[in-house]
Amino acid sequence: MPFQAATEPLASLFGDARVRPDWLRDRSPIRWGAYPSDVIPLTAAEPDFPGPQAVRDAMILSLADGYCPYAAPAGLGALREAFSDVAKARYGISATPDRVVLAPGTAAALWGVVHLLCGKGDECILLDPVDLLFGQAIDAAGARRVYCPLDKRTGQLDPDRLASLITPRTALICLCNPHNPLGTVFSEETLRAVAEIAGAHGVPVLSDEVWNEIVYPPAVHVSMAALDTTSSQPIYTLTGLSKTFALPGLRVGCVIAPNAREATRLQLTFQRLGGAYSLTPFAQAGALAALRHGWPWRDAFLEHLQEMRNYCVERLNGIPGWSCGRPDGTFVLFPDTSFSGLDSRAMGEFLLAEARVAVVAGTTEWFGPAAEGNIRISYATSRAVLEEALTRIERAVERLSAAQPCLHRVPPARTPGASRSRQRRNWALGSSA
């Protein structure tokens, strides 16, 4: 029978009852399942909510007859066309389907582009801080990392600083927009400046835009490939479903290549890397349903995330020795905890031991040298989980402050909802913690 998009009660999709830690500990091995039952993980940028019902229905339907054949290396034509349509309608990128290259996840897409364009002895410019996947891909290709520091306070990129780093060996400029972990949504002015610099030096740009649908008004995401500039440098735009529709495990990513020839070269690179046959038929069916029917779910998700962002920023700025900016995009925060007297790794270990809350430490291996002094927190979960986690953190840091009075810290501000979180604790965590 033909697929019919499911109708979901959008108002209740992101309530406290939708997050089930007892269930997630079995289903989320790198987040909930990675820690003991009394720990709240705010680590992986992975939502704790089920994705759109339409996606689940489409995947079940695709498996209903029990037939699961090989998928074509290029993927479903309908899926490439859907990515092309979304790129044009939502991001202003006029990309025909023959420029769309499917990949087994956005991380794999990043690796494919880096391996296509870079080799031993080349230099690749990446932002600092930024997600670890960029550096890993550059290392694996045999190229050398060249860090371009961002202003951690504002999250902004200095185009002149970027230009100063370009040498005859520069093979690629890597952007992350919206930026993980700072949450910056780069302005059109900044992107135009980067495009002109890249064009003047003949350097291609990899623009990772997997967070492009997690942007909070009044901020607006601009895709570099949609800009009308005088430069003609090739731009490879990366996107996917993991953040927009809470589908990281579906492993469906997309590269919009600058032209059909480069798309073919990239497809061959994926084959060389062994990733061409990793897109399963049922995953592609789910991806197609997400792109066709998942947008009302995304709109409700974004509304919930904006509320959680505002709540968490207020709570974090009330913790002694901490400072947290309000990001324009993503669902991660990157508070500066340096005035607490601990480096990033020690702070992560302290929170795990004393608050039983897991975070990602701002260490070089995770985000680059400039990340020191920060930790990353994902808030794509329920209000009840966040209330409990932040209350635990507040109390642990209070104890740390009391043990180090010479640091003269300001007492933490309390919010009205904080006192209620303890009553919800066992229910929210689904354990005897």
Image: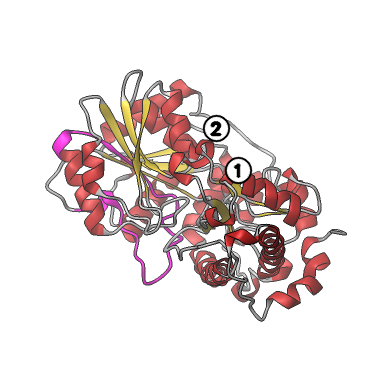
Task: Name the amino acid, label 2.
Answer: Ser
Report the residue at 68% width, 46% height from top. 349
The residue segment tinted magenta is 200-227
Task: Name the amino acid, label 1.
Answer: Arg
Marks 2 and 1, the one that precedes in the sequence: 2
Position of residue 426 in the picture relative to residue 301 (left or right) = right
The residue tagged 1 is 345
Report the residue at 75% width, 54% height from top. 354
Q: Quadrant of residue 318?
A: bottom right
Q: Is residue 5 above or below residue 45?
A: below
- Mark 2 vs mark 1, CA separation in Å: 35 Å
Between 308 and 56, the one nearer to me in the picture: 308
The residue tagged 2 is 278
User: SS for tag 2?
Assistant: loop
Q: Quadrant of residue 407?
A: bottom right
Q: Indicate yes or no whether the magenta region holds residue 204.
A: yes
Report the mark closest to the observer, 2 or 1.
1
